[in-house]
Every structure is written in C-alpha cells, then in structure tokens.
Amino acid sequence: MAKNKIDFDAVSKWAEINIDKFSRPAKYTKFNSGQSNPTYLVETSQKKYVLRKKPEGKLLKSAHAVDREYRVQLALQNSEVPVPRMAAFCSDLSILGTEFYIMDHIEGTCFEDPLLNTVAKDHRYSIFKEMSTILAKIHKVDLLKVGLSDFGPGGNYFSRQITRWTKQYLSSETDKIEKMDQLIKWLEENIPEDDERRCLVHGDFRLDNLLFNPNENKCVAVLDWELSTIGHPFADLASVLMQWSMPPGLEGRGLQGVNRKQHGLMEDQEFVDSYCKIMGLDGIHKFEFYMAFAFFRMAAILQGVKKRGLEGNASNPAKAIKLGNLVKLFAEKGIAILER
C-alpha cells in the first residue's frame, strides 16, 4: 500500500461487521487538519463517522496513540466532558497496516483562529469562558468512576514529561537549536516539588481542538486526545496561554499584540481567574515554570511533526514542515518567559 493511502474497501468491510447499522458504500474524505494522526470523514447513506488512524512509516515510541484516544473518549461517554460516541477500535493490522478507530461525526464549528473574527464581538468572550469551563470539567473527572485510574503512571508528572519529550525531541532533531538546549536544562533544574495534584489532562487543549454549537457558544465535543494522560492540571492551563502568546493568523494561531478588549476577548489573567474560580483555587504560584514547560513540550511536538514531514510520513507533509519551522520560535518564547 502506498504511503498515506487507505484501503477504503477493507475499512468498509470491517466496519460493516463491527459497527451496528454501518452500511456500504461509504465515501471517505480526508480532513486537512490533524498533523499527527490522519483523519477522515466517513459518509454512509445512514450516518456520518470519523476515522482516526496511525500514520505510516517508522514512528517514535509511544507517539500516535490512537488506542489511548479511543479508550479515554469511551470512558468519558457519560461524563460532563463532551466527546463523540466511539463506534469501534481496530487493532488488526491486516486491515490498514496500522491501528485505527471510528467514532460518530459531530456537527459543530471549529474555530481555528482565536481572534474569532467570524463570531459577533459580543459572543467572543463567552466562547473563551466556555473553554475555561470545559477545561475545569476535564480536570474534575472522577478517574476511578470512569475507569481511568490507571491511565498514567504515578510520580512527578513534570519530571516524567520533561524526560519523555527531551528524548522525543533529540530523536527527531534536524537542526541544533541553542535556545531549546537552554530551555531543557533550565526545566530539568527547576522542576517543582510534587504537590500531588493528579487528574485527567488533555495534553493539547486549545480552541481548535474543540467543536462548538455556534447558536449557543457551547462546546459540543473535545477532540484530539492523543496526548491525554493522568497528570498535572496546570500543564493544560499553561498550554492555552502559550498558544495565545503566538503571532496572530492561521500559522501562529495566537493573539500576540492583539488588543483583546477591543476585540471582545478574554485576557490571559481573566482566563486563569475563571478556571481557578471553577476549580476552587485562590491562584497559581510560580506559573512561569508551567508556561516554560508548555513552550518546551510544544517545540518538541513540532520537531517530531517536522521530521515526519521531511520523511513524507506526515498527514500533510508540506504543512508539517512549515509548522516544524516554528520550533525555534517556541524555544525562544520559553526562554523569554524565564528572562522576564
């Protein structure tokens, strides 16, 4: 099978056996988004689904964990966290050559640009407010009740993550980036003591991984759970602000330099305050560490995306290489946080 090509007939035959009321023929259309795991809209005469699979080629250890994506969303089906209904998971590599799963398609609006120019100004603040609410709901999930108490190892989450992503970064390194080396060294030397906060973390929580009902400004689905685990809630919170600190536009997808009040958008501190109020927190001490960690981890993720793009294994190789070129910028911003 050619790289990144799906045997649609094999999928349909498997789905007809494993998914109730799945009917052939089915039409498959690839989404342009989703740099990590190739994602397809599946349309039958009765219903729409979404297929997520691992990419082709040699993969980094523990990356592209579609099995974990499926498990966490299945566990959250009856929780307060909105997720699509899981239809079926396939571990049989003879079907596509990789693991994959199929879930229901959710009708909703994805806002790729946090400027929200397509939304009326007086509705934008409420979308950010909903983001903080959904993030808090994720962190309040009762792990034992939903069957996810073993979804991640114990111990210091940040120590574990810094070790993991440093290894991932070095294994996919294509250019020497001095600021990244400095950032890794600082993080390793400044890991905070374990405060024993443990919860479900999404791992890549940002606006464009949420689907909204545009009529109510309510989140109808949280997507892309590949990096989810049991971890520290402030990592998710910092990742939101990290993304907003990037340049505006569909490439940076940030709000750097934007007059948020003029655009009807939440300020960073307002978002943190909203989250803390829901979580019953007075505030967050030494938040700069969590921000620096967020920049480091995203830089490591994008370096992997770039490597796959150069090797032709990315979902969209050209876009992957372009995103990968932001690694240096994320590293520089992480260092800038510390210098301030």
Image: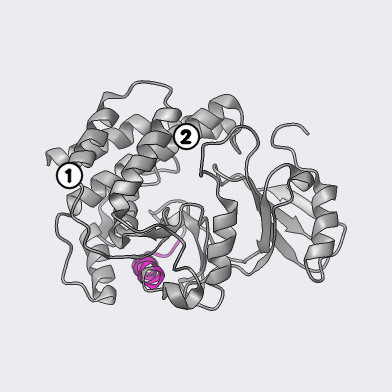
Foreground residue among 32 and 196: 196
User: How far across and down, in percent of the image, does residue 244 sit?
Assistant: 32, 50
Foreground residue among 295 and 148: 148
Residue highlighted by disc 2: 304
Tell me where the magenta segment starts and ends, as one range. Answer: 119-138
Q: Amino acid at mark 1?
A: Asn
Locate residue 170: give its quadrant. Answer: top left
Characterize the local packing of mark 1: few (<14), some (14-19) or many (20 or more) Cα atoms within 10 angstroms: few
Locate residue 46: give its quadrant. Answer: bottom right
User: How far across and down, in percent of the image, does residue 206 sit?
Assistant: 41, 55
Q: Amino acid at mark 2?
A: Gly
Locate residue 152: give its quadrant. Answer: bottom left
Q: Is residue 170 above or below residue 296?
A: above
- Residue 240 shows in this picture: yes
- Residue 265 shows in this picture: no
Q: Is residue 295 above or below residue 320?
A: below
Look at the image and name its color scheme: one colour
Q: Give left or right: position of 18 versus 307.
A: right
Earlier in the chain: of badge 1 and badge 2, it is 1
User: How far across and down, in percent of the image, does residue 52 sit?
Assistant: 64, 52
> Is residue 244 highlighted in magenta?
no
- Magenta segment's dominant SS is helix
State the residue at coordinates (39%, 54%). Answer: 114
Task: Measure how far apart labels 1 and 2 are at the Cα level.
Answer: 25 Å
Residue highlighted by disc 1: 190
